[in-house]
Image (cartoon, grey):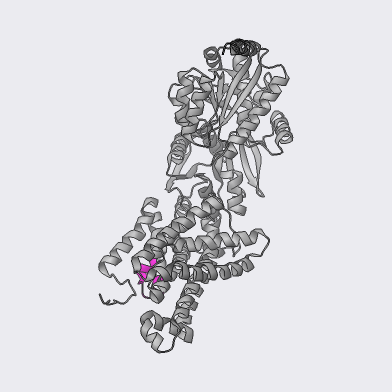
Amino acid sequence: MTSKVPAAMALACLLAGSTAHAQIKIAVIQELSGTGATAGTNFKNGLELAVKEINAAGGILGQKLEAAIDDTQSNPGVAKALALKAVDDGAFAVFGPTFSGSMTVSMAQTRNAKVPNFTGAEAAALTQQGNPYIFRTSLTQMTSMPKVARYIATGLKAKTVAVIFVNNDFGKGGRDAFVKAAAGAGLTVAADISTDAGLVDFSAPVVKAKRSNADAVFVYTNEEESARCLRELRKQGVTVPIIGETTLTGQRVIELAGAAADGAIAHVGLTAEAPIPAVREFRARFEKAYGAVPDHNGIKGYTSVYLLKVGIETAGKLDRVAVARALHGLKIRAAKQPGVLMDVAIDDNGDLDRASFIVQVKHGVQEVVEVLPPLAKF
Amino acid sequence: MADLLQLLVSGLATGSIYALAGLGFTLLWQASGTINFAQGEFVMLPAFAILAFSAIGVPLLVAFVLTCILAVVVLGWGFKRGIADPLLKSGLMPVVVATLGLSIALRNGVRAGYSAEAQPFPSLFGDALFHAGGVTVSLVDLGTLAAALALVVATQAFLTRTVTGRAMQAVAQNPTSATVLGIDVPRMIFYTFAINAVLACAAALLVTPTYLAKFDMGESLGTKAFFAAVIGGFNNSRGALLGGVIVGVCENLAAAYISAAYKDAVALAIFLLVILLKPQGLLGKPVERKV
């Protein structure tokens, strides 16, 4: 028994020694299996790439990053348990989960422990609960819709718009934000058409949209419904511009809708096709490392680590509360911090503002047709 | 007016698909007293089989023919021998319960074994559009309507004009007398199951480009087809056509003129009205049963 004491002491010294050299421990809680596997894996890959780059360049304040990766299995219960584990393990910051449902239940753990929590989740409500430790890595409906409305009014020179939306939390949230933004942009909503989730026959909603004689049709539904809606719009010979937000021109929708997706326009917050040199270079590095083109979650994962880096450097010390405080209200210029890829502003709720893109499907491929500036001035 | 015509055309196309699946309900009921609540899944499975054949480079129509052969064996013979024959001896209720279970098993089997995501499906007809008097009609809608109508008429002609068809009707009306007349009753019943399987394949080929191939695509289709069969008359093959068209057109009109939320409710409302006022269905004949 006594012979084990020196060994235990030696181990304790070793552990103490390792913390003295200090690594900045970050916890990555992502959907690596289950329905969110594509999103979570992309986020994780982007994040790991950033960690490698930052460590190769000497770390943050001279300390290296060490990422502990865990899989939520796309399950909110597991995500909550993993957030608790991350906090217990002394993580300096937590990255994820990406599913809004998982984030809703897991963020209480990081909030209680005052650990900055970066997320790719996009539900508007997440940042409206006064949590000072949550930080987005992408735009939300509240920031996207004013840009879409402005583009329809000025870019497409439309006066009226028909709105087809899906009657669930995602669709209603987007519809409300869009209608509000449309009024602000001087657009008249000529038809406000609700559709059921899982709807297969879009002939009636499309007839209603046509009957309104609107100058443009705004479609805000989930992926499968978007594809069916695009098919029906083409089937009924609708020729006015068809616009959506992110989902409408997603790769999955393009595959499902086939030729009917050609010409569809959408506003996207992040895309690897962006005509920005920093994004192009990131895309090339990502492709080299993982043999695949990053999706928007890959970009979110990559830039999120750089947001933390800027936060720590601005605070000047490894203090979680100080870092969270430093990030709020911060405007980061990509010229000075190339890792964030694009100029970005973080508001007091942890929401982001940055440039975004109007893309159009041409011959089955998404092409960027316009870069929309951020709402804030840099 | 143009809107109304537009809605009528697409409603007719959708309704004709309900009619195809509904026809299977009436055929099985007439020939063997079976109600198949997995009828929607009988449309979903061939859709995935066609996709699987297409994936290995088989042209669409050849894939369809191969799927029909496979369906006759699995959904026709297999279903008859595995579920209908052994359970019918104990009455109708075990068959109903078994087919309900079968539908759940097939849905979840495809979800777990293939994918939970919708898959694109090639269309038999091109993307051509025709414009006339403010109405835009697509070749897809016209083709679907024409193909479904042709199949219903052909089935009807087969049943009434051919010796085999008449023998099948004789079996449906009175199996004992049919046996006395020298008709091979089990064979005639198998033919009915086989025709049902082929009709399901045809419905899959016509409807999947719109519905997209997905494990749960048969759920609403099966229900609507059942409504169509009951509305038209469960013991009349032409009734399924009428019922299908009524359901397809009415739900389209309701979605456009009342609210999208009432789309599915309309089919249910007509179903209830018919059950209350004319339980044998619009074209069905009252049947007396011995207790």
Magenta span dominant secondary structure:
helix
Q: Is residue A282 left or right of residue A304?
A: right
Q: Residue at x 33, y 75 (%)?
A: B284
Residue A347 appears at what percent x and percent y? 52, 21
Instruction: Locate the C terminus of chain A and report the quarter of the image it occupies.
Output: top right
Q: Is residue A284 above or below residue A59?
A: below
Residue B48 appears at what percent x and percent y? 56, 59
Q: Residue at x 38, y 55 (%)?
A: B263
Residue A270 picture quarter: top right
Viewer-nearest residue: B192 or A200: B192
Q: Is residue A339 left or right of residue B248?
A: right
In the rendered image, residue B172 lying in the magenta stretch gets the answer no
Q: Is residue B226 left or right of residue B57?
A: left
Residue A183 appears at what percent x and percent y? 45, 35
Residue A46 picture quarter: top right
Q: Which residues are magenta?
A: B228-241
Confirm whether residue A378 shows in the render.
no
Q: Is residue B283 left or right of residue A76?
A: left
Q: Is residue A367 above or below residue A234?
A: above
Most extreme residue toward the bottom is: B181
Q: Residue at x 38, y 82 (%)?
A: B175
Residue A309 picture quarter: top right
Instruction: Locate the N terminus of chain A and report the quarter of the image it occupies.
Output: top right
Viewer-nearest residue: B100 or B8: B100
Residue A282 appears at what percent x and percent y? 70, 30
Confirm whether residue A31 shows in the render.
yes
Q: Is residue B17 above or below residue A351?
A: below
Count of numbered tags:
0
